[in-house]
Amino acid sequence: MSLILKSLINILTLFIILATSNSTLAQSNIPLKQNGLQSKDPVSTTSKLQDTTKIKAGDSTKSLQDTTKKKGNGLQAEVSIIAVDSQKSEVARNISHLYRGAKVKYQDFELSADYIRLDRNQKKIFASGIYDKSGKYVGRPIVIMGNGESPKTVDSLYYDYEKQEGNTYGIMTEVDGGFIQANIVRKNIYDEMSIYKGLYSTCNLPYPHTHFGIHISKGIVTKNQIISGPAYLVVMGVPMPVAFPFAFFPKPDKRASGFLFPSFGEDYTRGFSMRDIGWYLAFNDYWDSEIRGSLYSKGSWEASINTRYTVNYKFNGGFNIRYANTKVGVEGTDNYGSNKDFNVTWNHTQRQEANPGTSFSASVNFGTASYFQNTGTGSNQTTYQNLAQNRMGSSISYGKVFADGKVNLTASLTHSQNMADRTIQLSLPNISLNVSSFNPFDSKDRVGEQKWYQRINVGYSFQAQNTVSTADSLLFSSGGFKRFQNGFQHNIPVSLSLNAFKYFQFNTSVNYTERWYLQSTRQRIDNTPSGYKQRLDTLQGFNRAYDYSISTGLSTKIYGMYPKIGKIEAIRHVVTPSINFNYRPDFSDPRYGFYQHYNDQYGNRNVYSIFAQGIYGSPSAGKSAGIGFSIDNNIEAKVKSKSDTTDGGFKKIPILQGLTFSGNYNFVADSLKLSPITFSGRTAFFDQKMNVNFNGTFDPYTIDDNGVRINRYAIKDGSLARLTNFGLSFDYSLNPKAAKSRNNNIDSLRKEMSGAGMTPEQAQALARISSDPNAFVDFNIPWNLAASFSFNMSKFFNASTRRMDNQITSTLNLHGDFSVTPKWKVTFQSGYDFKQKEVVMTSFNIYRDLHCWDMSFGWMPFGRYRSYNVTIRAKASILQDLKLTKRASSGGGYF
């Protein structure tokens, strides 16, 4: 609790600035008796009203209007009054009492309420609501000041309409996501306000039952400055010994630069910390920036600059540059040192209406592989997804659509970084040009059905790439950019589809591909003093390589119905067989010039492709003329259902969905003509609660004693085929409504945020909710328990045992939540890796809904990033950074 109080001291000043940054008149639905505020009436005539006023429920509505203009008393305009129900006048005192739907207008000032007392002699008005038969306070005053502000609703007011000043009682207003209440607010003609007994909170209830706020005894608010009297902190309705006797602040009418308060904590490896202290820079209405830093008592430090920009209806984005110097080891020992890491992110989005037909976007994320691992959970911008990730990627893309949408051009710069092996791949740039397929022999003025030749379909695509793949430490070294490889590829597919013999679908296609390279390679053997060495030379110069293939096939559907079995009314089996003939020449033939050869030290002839290192590959060696085949199966049952009245009271239950076998037989191959047979399928159980997917490969050939496939069918050795790999996965949810509710909430949130103009912070939060189920806590779902399992087995030849062994990986994951009460929820996620025989990353979280705030406790009990944290956070978006946190993180150490 001590750290919470320290954090509250730090944010007290900022709370006061937020609390008084806008006008204090706003809409409210607070009955006078609920908030303890009383309507003040300095010129009370209650006794006379009881004698002279009769308000009867059910009276016919009447409209009385009294429009007067007295030139001798200094009034500059007419005072217009209207009473929908009734009006009483005290002629001697020149006072009017208006009831039910009463309205008074003087110049730009307008007032409506269920009770108004107008004193023409004093030029003063008192207005309030009244209590109906049920005791509900209704008809509160609504004020329009005529200065461009929206109408304001208050409990009661006393106003001098000639001097344009007065007191407002029992008001509540929203201030940029927070709420301020005050017993009395006085506003004069100069737009200056005085506040008496004000309370600032993020809660929109009449009196916050669970709030953290600031109580301001007295305050003066002008256009450019704020002067506050005694102010103190209130936590859960209890005054805290955290107060200021007075305060003076500037109050600009636009965003202003200012100090960013830090948070304090402790890290078990880096020591005590002061995190995220910095300065906010508001350059203009289009962009701003935050400069932050973190210091640790054991010498580590971090710095970052986060900049955001936006131009309405055109584009928005931002970039974040982070650097960390992390001390490792024990000071004074040989292993003591520093890890220097950095991370850069940039996001940019262009609005569609800014330039129709053209798009530009950027998503950049690069840096050292160990940045998030070394900074641990200490940074407020680090998530557990950052800690667990092993890849980083970036993409900057530009797109243009022209020729009436038939041609699409895209250009992109991409980056992929593997943090496990510290390799990096850059593509600078990637270019793709795609032309929509068309029928060259068809006519726009054609009448009737297409002829067979008019169905011929032609397409075209073009790709260009310039890429390099290297270790991240060598990228910017001498000669690093000479490692780039580049190439161009053209692809022209021609296809024809016809209905043949009524029940068959006939398809034929010709595919032509041409590649252009600016480099080619040559291989040779050199006899050196240390022995023979294989050399690879790269030759510069333009070269072209091409290939083509032809494919023709037939497909159909076969339907089978099985008779009734028990409660199963029928079983339908749909088989979709397809067969195709394919042909591809041998492009290693010397006449093409794509392949060359060299003799090794033993005189053996070695054939290689001069384009083997090309980024689009090389034309294939060896002639192929074979038959490809596939069989797809779909089996479903129909059973009677009492709950499902559709389809005649029957319910369809899937048994097998998409069970597919496929392979190819090459007639012209010297051996091993039959390819491995692949299969895959999926199904669902328990009323679609469990989804099951499986896949695998059968090898029809046997192997020799060295694990090499030989031209001998396995069936001759007693088995139909060898299972070389198999994969199985399933997921199961005991409460499928939870996932459906979560998706619906995310969709509605996305629509709401996009309609109002999504800020970068909102977009980031939405992205995290979409990618991390545990980032979204749905109190409307009382419980949820889900599990997923993955299994994969592959065969490999073990040289030491001289036999085939199995390599198996399997993982079980669990996640769920349950509500202890309507305001308390517990969530968890965990799993078990059966190969490593260890529990995977496990976390527990407890959430408490505090209406305008929420509280959470998170605990990772073991692993490298074991930690715990307690967070109390305001729900208002403007206060998301004003959080009170007690955090302890392991950062790789022990506690």
Image (cartoon, grey):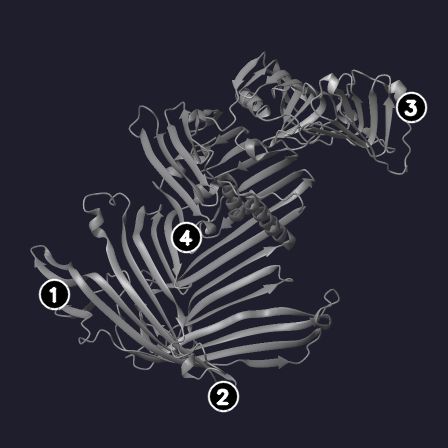
Nearest to the eye among marks 3 and 4: give it. 3
- Above or below: residue 574 compared with residue 231: below
Mark 3 neighbour class, 10 Å CA radius: few under 14, some 14 to 19, many 20 or more? few
Upstream in sequence: badge 3 or badge 4: 3
Instruction: Tell me, yes or no, whether the two marked residues, 1 and 4, touch with CB atoms within 8 Å.
Output: no
Q: Is residue 232 above or below residue 154?
A: above
Disc nearest the viewer among 4 and 2: 4
Q: Are marks 2 and 1 in contact (CB under 8 Å)?
A: no
Q: Position of residue 341 (x, y in %)?
A: 34, 36
Give the residue drawn at x 53%, y 33%: 868
Question: What x and y, as percent, mark residue 713?
Answer: 37, 78
Q: Does residue 828 lie above or below 700 as drawn?
A: above
Q: Nearer the viewer, residue 855 or 248?
A: 248
Query: Quick one: 480 or 78, which is closer to the camera?
Result: 78
Q: Secondary structure at mark 2?
A: loop
Say which amino acid is labelled 1: Gln
Residue at the image position 53 percent from the left and 74 percent from the top: 633
List the single residue furthest toward the left.
529
Under circle 1, the secondary element is loop
Three-letter amino acid code of the residue under disc 3? Thr
Tell me the number on the disc at residue 741.
none
Is residue 536 visible in the rendered image? The answer is: no
Q: Which residue is mark 3?
A: 52
Mark 2 residue crowding within 10 angstroms, few (<14) / some (14–19) / many (20+) = few
| Coordinates of residue 70 in the picture (x, y in percent) | 76, 21
Q: Nearer the viewer, mark 2 or mark 1?
A: 2
User: Which sits in the foreground, 352 or 229?
Assistant: 352
Q: Which residue is mark 2?
A: 501
Between disc 4 and disc 2, whose residue precedes? Answer: 4
Label 2 or label 1, whichever comes before in sequence order: 2
Which residue bears the numbered disc 4? 359
Q: Is residue 196 left or right of residue 787?
A: right
